[in-house]
């Protein structure tokens, strides 16, 4: 029997460094910026005493977990480093939640970070350590559904383009986002191709960044602040490699469907579209966002295009998605992204999201999908 | 009596219109040459020619594989062993490389015929493949082409039997390539033709005719290695051959394919040969080598194949001379290619059956095919119930695709496709195609290609090709 994490753990502090091509910042700089903002948010004045354990996530780690301990000068405490594609941050968060629910700790720190921009290449590097599976770029992996989905549901690049336009707009409203530039559908359609159907603007902005949250026992959360945010559900799920799965239908990503089912069960959600107020989902590519509307059960399979054109998921729409610009505009330091989404949802639930605030938001979801893709992590937060 | 029981050939679909070399626009129907693309080399072309040859042949019946080429990708490491593995031949097949001379092709053919005649092999496969390069914009560049031929030799139901052979050796510095060099060099044209090619070819053919006791006019088709059209005409005149007897040397379409040239012309001759016809083939290089064959009734029963003519018809012209330079690795790169160690030898070793022989696993409990072969079955969860199942000669269906503009290629984008073969999903690159050629549901075949040369060595795997191009019908 599967249990639920619902209402056992609270977020009492959240922080993030500025995302972008942080040429003048090391990993240490970004980790410290994110963690110290989270400390301040939680009113933690003596982290060495108050933080009992640390859970870190990073996909391009040069070092082990000690790097985070060294940056924050938090020694003699249990610390773990996770690395598992794009849901790394959400998984580090999940481990943090479980460590508290297990009764091991009262207060833990979760840090997600990555610094891909020290590698000297723009975008992901081309992989030559195998002969199979090439070309191996995330754009190629995530485009796998495009031809069949387009053909089946009469959808095309121009439908995807509106998603990029939305996320660019939202990014202009987030102070810490990487890109603050409005774009048009024409800009998206005319951009140079990366991997069909993805042009440059269909792809997330790879960036440097770090985000952090402080977790505490739910029953002790008000000792940190008056408006703690409660964890309603968190899970990860894995699906067969879509390039090998004999049943893969090229219309939906199974990892999201699997994870959504479990997390809705944990959170007691029957109708996600009606019940959830704000969503941060993994828009690594425009098509990923479109498919995820359906895979999360927000709308019928094949109907996402209509919602895109109706503005359902825009700020001011029925269910705003990627309010801070998402991976597309806020930036995508892989290991940080899951934690950054939880940071944004925390701000939304506490009414601190400024110009991009979703009024009265009380239930928020964040979602990552990663690998070829094979894995998904989802976290649901609520105010009461 | 030993003879040829099947033949095949391969000509790369990529063509360099010769006009592009001097910066002129390519003209439709103008002279061109066949070019091994960036993902092809003598090994991949040999595999392709062998697959053309082995249609409807039980590969387990082959006892020997001789591979002739002057352009092996590796100086120390047997190329025939790679070809045998890619063809999924038996482990106890006798493999050998024949190299060093443009005569290597006919030499391998003769050695195999002896092995069959002596009973050392019931069925021997001979593949000849070459992709020589002249220096960019140098005199040889426009003349050399790339291609391969394959012959299955057997004493059972041959389509053509060996009648006689004759060989001479001759030391002359006419064509050469020193160890470690990329480009073939030649002495002055007229010297090569007047003192080398013409007298040696006439001598070796006359020697053969003496052995067979026949006149030159008795041969229906004569496949002559030739340096150029004029030299070929000179040899024909000296031997008293008519224009009708001479097999078209395909100048301006194929190019001189080195060790594979005379063997490919023999394939061309066999493609249209009728029972009872007599064929003569003459190779040249450090001497000469001539073989006489007689075509049997079995030629009528041979399954259709692409051969030289079918492959010549499938063509895609390079758009620029720069594309040619990139496709042969002659351009300057941002980073030195293959500077790292490349693929791990241990990983290559473990994945040899899937990467080279293109084996999927077939679950003996539920029949599910899976590539690569896992331990636990995705269909029924049975553990270790797999048997190898060769995908390379099966037809697949294209399920999805993308066009990757990032992957290094002479003419991006690189096309990645998801294919399904008998319920097995395989993701591969699509070769010989441009984005406008791709459609969902298209049938695909598979072709052995060089994926990259990380580590400074060729790393091979399979790619898909659209089947319409490959159909011999």
Image (spheres, coloured by chain):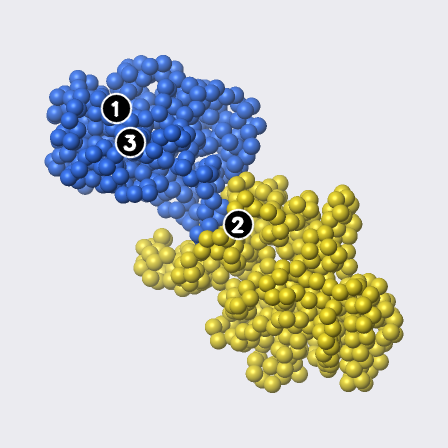
Of B226 and B377, nearer the camera is: B226
Q: Disc 3 versus disc 2: distance between alpha carbons?
A: 35 Å
Q: Residue at (35%, 25%) from the top-left corner? A: A18
Q: Tell me the colour chain B is drawn in.
A: yellow
Question: Residue B15, can we see it?
Answer: yes
Q: Position of residue A110 (x, y in %)?
A: 24, 33
| Left or right side of A290 for B312 | right
The residue carrying pointer 2 sits among few (fewer than 14), some (14 to 19) or many (20 or more) residues within 10 Å by Cα, namely: few
| Tag 1 near tag 3, CB within 8 Å | no
Nearer the observer, A35 or B401: A35
Location of residue A306 in the rendering, given as x and y in whole percent from the top left corner: 46, 24
Instruction: Name which residue lies at 66% across and 49% down.
Output: B324
Tell me where residue B358 appears, x and y as whole percent: 48, 60
Kindly state the secondary structure of the residue where label 2 is placed: loop
Check disc 1 and report the residue beneath it: A37
| Real-space CA distance between mark 2 and mark 1, rounded to the nearest whole angstrom | 44 Å
The vertical placement of B345 against A65, above or below, is below
A356 w.r.t. B40: above or below: above
Q: Chain of mark 3?
A: A
Colour chain A appears in: blue
Could you tell me which chain the residue with mark 2 belongs to?
B
Q: Nearer the viewer, mark 3 or mark 2?
A: 2
Identify the residue under disc 2.
Answer: B336
């Amino acid at each position: 029997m599967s249990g639920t994490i619902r209402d056992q753990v609270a977020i009492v502090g959240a922080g993030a460094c500025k995302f972008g091509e942080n040429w003048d910042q090391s990993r240490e700089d970004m980790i410290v910026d994110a963690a110290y903002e989270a400390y301040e948010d939680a009113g933690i004045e003596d982290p060495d005493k108050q933080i009992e354990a640390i859970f870190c996530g990073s996909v391009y780690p040069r070092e082990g977990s000690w790097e985070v301990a060294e940056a924050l000068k938090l020694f003699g405490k249990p610390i773990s480093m996770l690395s598992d594609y794009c849901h790394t941050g959400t998984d580090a968060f999940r481990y943090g939640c479980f460590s508290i629910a297990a009764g091991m700790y009262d207060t833990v720190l979760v840090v997600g970070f990555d610094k891909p921009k020290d590698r000297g290449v723009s975008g992901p590097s081309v992989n030559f350590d195998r002969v199979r599976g090439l070309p191996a770029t995330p754009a190629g992996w995530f485009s796998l559904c495009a031809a069949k989905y387009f053909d089946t549901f009469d959808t095309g690049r121009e439908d995807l383009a509106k998603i990029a336009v939305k996320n660019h707009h939202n990014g202009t409203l987030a102070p810490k986002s990487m890109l603050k530039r409005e774009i048009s559908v024409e800009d998206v359609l005319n951009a140079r191709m990366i991997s069909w159907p993805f042009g440059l603007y269909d792809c997330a902005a790879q960036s440097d960044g770090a985000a952090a949250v402080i977790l505490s026992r739910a029953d002790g959360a008000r000792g940190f602040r008056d408006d703690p945010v409660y964890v309603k559900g968190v899970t990860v799920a894995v699906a067969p490699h879509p390039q090998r799965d004999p049943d893969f239908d090229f219309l939906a990503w199974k990892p999201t469907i699997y994870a959504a089912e479990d997390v809705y069960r944990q959170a007691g959600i029957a109708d996600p579209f009606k019940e959830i107020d704000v969503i941060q989902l993994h828009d690594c590519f425009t098509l990923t966002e479109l498919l995820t509307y359906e895979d999360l059960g927000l709308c019928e399979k094949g109907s996402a295009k209509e919602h895109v054109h109706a503005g359902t998921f825009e700020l001011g729409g029925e269910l705003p998605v990627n309010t801070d610009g998402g991976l597309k505009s806020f930036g995508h330091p892989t290991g940080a992204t899951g934690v950054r989404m939880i940071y944004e949802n925390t701000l939304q639930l506490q009414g601190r999201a400024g110009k991009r605030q979703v009024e009265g938001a009380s239930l928020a979801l964040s979602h990552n999908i990663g690998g070829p893709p094979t894995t998904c992590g989802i976290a649901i937060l609520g105010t009461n | 009596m030993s003879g040829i029981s099947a033949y095949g050939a391969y000509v790369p679909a990529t063509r360099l219109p010769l006009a592009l070399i001097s910066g002129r626009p390519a003209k439709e129907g103008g002279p061109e040459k066949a070019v091994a693309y960036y993902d092809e080399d003598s090994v991949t072309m040999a595999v392709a020619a062998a697959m053309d040859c082995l249609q409807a042949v039980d590969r387990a019946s082959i006892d020997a594989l001789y591979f002739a080429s002057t352009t092996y990708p590796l100086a120390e490491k047997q190329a025939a062993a790679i070809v045998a593995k890619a063809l999924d031949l038996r482990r106890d097949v006798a493999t050998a490389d024949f190299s060093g001379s443009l005569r290597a092709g006919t030499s391998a053919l003769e050695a195999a015929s002896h092995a069959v005649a002596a009973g050392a092999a019931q069925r021997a496969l001979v593949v000849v493949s070459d992709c020589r390069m002249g220096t960019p914009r140098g005199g040889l560049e426009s003349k050399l082409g790339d291609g391969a031929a394959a012959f299955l030799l057997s004493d059972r139901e041959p389509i053509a039997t060996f009648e006689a052979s004759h060989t001479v050796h001759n030391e002359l510095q006419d064509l050469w390539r020193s160890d470690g060099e990329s480009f073939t060099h030649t002495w002055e044209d007229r010297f090569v033709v007047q003192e080398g090619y013409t007298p040696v070819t006439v001598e070796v053919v006359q020697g053969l005719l003496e052995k067979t006791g026949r006149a030159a006019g008795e041969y229906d088709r004569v496949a002559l290695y030739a340096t150029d059209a004029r030299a070929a005409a000179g040899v024909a005149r000296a031997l008293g051959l008519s224009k009708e007897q001479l097999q078209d040397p395909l100048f301006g379409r194929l190019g001189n394919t080195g060790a594979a040239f005379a063997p490919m012309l023999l394939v061309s001759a066999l493609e249209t040969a009728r029972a009872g016809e007599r064929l003569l083939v003459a190779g040249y290089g450090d001497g000469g080598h001539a073989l006489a064959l007689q075509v049997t009734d079995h030629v009528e029963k041979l399954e259709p194949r692409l051969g030289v003519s079918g492959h010549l018809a499938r063509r895609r012209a390079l758009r620029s001379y720069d594309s040619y330079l990139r496709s042969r690795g002659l351009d300057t790169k941002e980073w030195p290619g293959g500077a790292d160690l490349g693929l791990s030898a241990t990983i290559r070793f473990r994945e040899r059956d899937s990467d080279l022989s293109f084996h999927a696993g077939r679950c003996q409990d539920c029949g599910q095919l899976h590539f690569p072969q896992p331990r636990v079955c995705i269909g029924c969860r049975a553990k270790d119930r797999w048997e190898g199942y060769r995908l390379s000669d099966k037809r697949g269906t294209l399920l999805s695709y993308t066009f990757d503009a990032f992957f290094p290629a002479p003419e991006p984008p690189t096309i990645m496709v998801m294919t399904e073969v008998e319920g097995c999903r395989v993701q591969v690159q699509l070769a010989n195609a441009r984005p406008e050629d791709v459609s969902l549901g298209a049938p695909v075949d598979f072709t052995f290609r060089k994926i990259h040369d990380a580590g400074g060595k060729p790393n091979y795997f399979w790619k898909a090709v659209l089947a319409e191009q490959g159909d011999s019908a």
